[in-house]
């Protein structure tokens, strides 16, 4: 960022805050003048406490204390002008105003401390998201990609929903999943599955073998993350995709996860008919590749696959109505992935009134060509060929 622009960005909050400070100062002046001009039986001095109370709404304890000191000085000035400074009534008013100012400063200080703690929590959450949910690249082979995560907990930026994408051996493999539960309580199982996927995707050549391997990993370690009173109730719904670079198809396996939306350039939206297997972690027996059915769906240039978790389709408005996901997505079928998710995010939050009750994740994958673009030649290559990664 340009240093001049950075300085401008720092100045703007400072200028706004000082502009707001004029409001309580003007109130002190107005209340003082009206009190002096009003009849002797009308006393407006006690309402000077409004000044520090208003200041505390947008400033810290320092400016609040200065505004309170100005209000106390104004009360003393009124007492001097009216010749009542030594009366018990004015003395009590001044003392009460000073005490209330100190209380307001104290609560303002507590609020600022809590705010700093919240910022630390958010920074830790952001770091956890970067470690676990690696941001997807803009392109994976012939695909343009975009992703979106909306956490149900305001203090967090990550929870029980997860996604990952890896390009290997001329194909993209994508996973989106939803751990039972939400927020930070489901983070451990999400981390387990993401780590297992990133390792197993390079070891298993078929989607059924990959699905079986992921199920074994979840079953092996899920007891470490499940409370004893919820034993046997933990699972993860997942959708696994394999998109070859050279074929206009996509292969899918659903483990209890909703099927994606397939958006065509002509505003057509379809939902592939999948043959779901049980969610990962339902460990009634040892899973084998034969337990999983691969569904093949045409996926040509210009098509967009929209993957999502149930936090999207189960989002309700204030009347209890579910979010009409497919109908709303049909409005933006011709949009690039990042624009598509921007529209959906804004529309979804407007539907629920700004706050989701469950975590929500979305991935948009748009095939731009039948073949991936060739990487540029290098005059002095270093090392072997590089692979696209997450």
Image: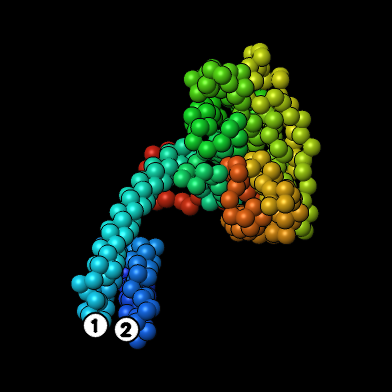
**Residue at horizontal 46 percent and vertical 37 percent from the top:** 132
Name the residue nearer the viewer: 162 or 170.
Answer: 162
- Would residue 71 be seen by someone viewing this image from the given angle? yes
* Secondary structure at numbered mark 2: helix
How far across and down, in percent of the image, does residue 18 sit?
32, 73
Q: Quadrant of the N terminus?
A: bottom left
Asked if residue 292 is positioned above or below residue 48 in the image, the reply reads above
| Mark 1 vs 2: CB contact within 8 A | yes
Query: Which labelled disc corresponds to residue 36?
Result: 2
Circle 1 sits on which residue?
81
User: Relative to residue 263, is residue 390 drawn left or right?
Assistant: left
Asked if residue 115 is positioned above or below residue 159 in the image, the reply reads below
Asked if residue 181 is positioned above or below residue 126 in the image, the reply reads above
**Residue at horizontal 62 percent and vertical 55 percent from the top:** 353
**Residue at horizontal 22 percent and vertical 80 percent from the top:** 83
Question: Could you classify mark 1 by the number of other residues whose Cα lies within 10 Å: few (under 14), some (14-19), or many (20 or more)?
Answer: few
């Amino acid at each position: 960022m340009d240093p001049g622009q950075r300085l401008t960005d720092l100045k703007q909050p400072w200028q706004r805050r000082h502009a707001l400070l004029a409001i309580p100062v003007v109130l002190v002046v107005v209340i003082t003048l009206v009190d002096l001009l009003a009849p002797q039986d009308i006393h407006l001095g006690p309402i000077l406490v409004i000044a520090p109370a208003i200041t505390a709404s947008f400033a810290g304890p320092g400016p609040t204390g200065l505004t309170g000191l100005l209000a106390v000085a104004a009360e003393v000035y009124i007492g001097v002008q009216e010749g009542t400074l030594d009366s018990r009534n004015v003395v009590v008013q001044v003392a009460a105003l000073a005490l209330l100012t100190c209380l307001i400063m104290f609560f303002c200080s507590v609020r600022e401390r809590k705010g700093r703690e919240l910022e630390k929590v958010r920074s830790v959450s952001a770091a956890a998201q970067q470690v676990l949910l690696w941001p997807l690249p803009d392109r994976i082979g012939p695909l343009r990609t975009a992703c979106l995560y909306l956490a149900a907990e305001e203090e967090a930026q990550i929870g029980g929903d997860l996604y990952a994408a890896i390009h290997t051996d001329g194909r993209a493999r994508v996973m989106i999943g939803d751990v039972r539960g939400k927020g930070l309580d489901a983070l451990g199982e999400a981390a387990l599955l993401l780590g297992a996927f990133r390792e197993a995707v390079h070891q298993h050549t078929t989607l059924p073998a990959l699905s079986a391997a992921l199920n074994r990993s979840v079953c092996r370690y899920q007891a470490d993350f499940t409370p004893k009173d919820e034993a046997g109730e933990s699972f993860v719904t997942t959708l696994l995709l394999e998109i070859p670079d050279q074929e206009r198809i996509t292969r899918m396996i659903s483990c209890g996860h909703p099927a994606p939306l397939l958006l065509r350039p002509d505003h057509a939206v379809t939902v592939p008919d999948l043959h779901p297997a049980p969610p990962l972690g339902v460990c009634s027996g040892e899973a084998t590749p034969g337990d999983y059915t691969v569904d093949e769906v045409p996926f040509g240039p210009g098509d967009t696959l929209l993957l999502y978790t149930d936090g999207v389709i189960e989002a309700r408005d204030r009347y209890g109505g579910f979010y009409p996901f497919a109908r709303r997505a049909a409005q933006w079928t011709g949009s690039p992935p990042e624009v598509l998710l921007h529209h959906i995010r804004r529309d979804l939050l407007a539907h629920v009134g700004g706050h989701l009750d469950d975590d929500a994740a979305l991935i948009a994958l748009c095939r731009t060509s039948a073949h991936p673009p060739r990487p540029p030649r290098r005059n002095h290559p270093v090392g072997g060929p590089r692979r696209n990664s997450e």
